[in-house]
Image (cartoon, grey):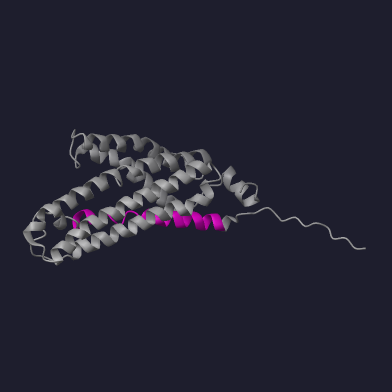
């Protein structure tokens, strides 16, 4: 009678080239999130009180919406790309980061819909009667921007920054920028809501800078360098953690 020895599967390994590809993907997506910067200028006309009844093309507003839609998708993409790696550090925090990124993307899409609805009103010839509605939609966009793109990056910085700082996957100065900038950005948003300063002020510019540098530097580093050699990457390559 013949017997067959039981087989055991080798532990799952994550090749270093796969980790490099993951880092590059996340880095490129982080850099893509900066393509919406021109939308601040492109959205200028559609936010004007006389836009609904005035002359001029709708192309700038549509282009701004397209850029912000790209950013919304890239926001989700950054979290999805990094999740398989950073969840090995702390799965709960990694999942919270994905959820925060999805929420941020949702506010961006809702804001796009608000401004493009004004374009639709204009194209439909709604006239002066739609001016009040248009201004309400502009106010809605402003609040969505304030609660989404002006607040959620601080939450993201705390969640992802803590994961990257503890894991050592990137130089610790990068997540430190995000962790320091998060309370500044939240303070700026709270001050704007309370009317202590306007949406565009010296303090607002200073408060936004650390988070902007954190996200830009992280995107560049992951794209060019990838993950640093760290205990977590060694364990992933060896198939010790899953």
Image point (35%, 37%), residue name? 182
Residue 59 appears in the picture as rendered: yes
Q: Is residue 216 magenta?
A: no
Left or right of residue 93, residue 75 in this image? left
* Residue 13 against residue 126 in the figure, above or below: above
Give above or below for 167 relative to 83. Answer: above
Give the residue drawn at x 51%, y 58%: 21
Quadrant of the rendering where the N terminus is positioned: bottom right
Q: Residue at x 10, y 55 (%)?
A: 131
- The part of the chain drawn in magenta is 18-42
Residue 32 seen in the current view: no
Query: How many numbered marks, from 0 up?
Result: 0
Percent across and percent down for residue 136 are: 16, 50
User: Observer-nearest residue: 56 or 175?
Assistant: 56
Dominant secondary structure (helix, strand or loop) of the stretch shown in magenta: helix
Q: Position of residue 226 (x, y in %)?
A: 49, 52
| Residue 50 picture quarter | bottom left
Residue 133, horizontal then vertical, whole percent: 14, 54
Percent across and percent down for residue 87 are 53, 46
Instruction: Identify the residue at the far right of this view.
Output: 1
Q: Is residue 68 left or right of residue 96?
A: left
Res 201 → quadrant: top left
- 159 and 51: which one is in front? 51
Q: Is residue 125 above or below residue 240?
A: below
- Say whether residue 82 is left or right of residue 32: right
Magenta highlight on residue 19: yes
């Amino acid at each position: 009678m013949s017997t067959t020895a039981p087989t055991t599967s080798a532990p799952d390994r994550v090749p270093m080239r796969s980790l490099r590809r993951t880092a590059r993907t996340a880095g490129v997506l982080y850099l893509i999130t900066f393509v919406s910067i021109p939308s601040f200028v492109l959205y200028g006309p559609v936010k004007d009180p006389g836009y609904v009844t005035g002359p001029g093309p709708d192309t700038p507003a549509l282009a701004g919406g397209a850029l912000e839609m790209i950013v919304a998708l890239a926001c989700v993409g950054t979290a999805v790309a990094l999740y398989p790696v950073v969840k090995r550090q702390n799965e709960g925090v990694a999942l919270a980061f994905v959820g925060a990124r999805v929420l941020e993307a949702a506010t961006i899409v809702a804001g796009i819909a608000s401004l493009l609805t004004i374009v639709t009103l204009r194209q439909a010839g709604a006239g002066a009667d739609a001016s009040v509605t248009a201004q309400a939609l502009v106010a809605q966009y402003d609040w969505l921007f304030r609660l989404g793109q002006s607040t959620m990056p601080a939450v993201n910085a705390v969640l992802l920054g803590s994961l990257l700082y503890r894991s050592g996957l990137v130089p610790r100065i990068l997540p430190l920028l995000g962790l320091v900038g998060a309370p500044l950005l939240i303070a700026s948003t709270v001050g704007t809501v309370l009317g202590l300063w306007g949406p565009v002020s010296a303090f607002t510019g200073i408060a936004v800078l650390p988070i902007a540098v954190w996200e830009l530097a992280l995107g560049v580093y992951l794209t060019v360098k990838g993950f640093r050699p760290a205990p977590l990457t060694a364990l992933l390559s060896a198939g010790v953690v899953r």
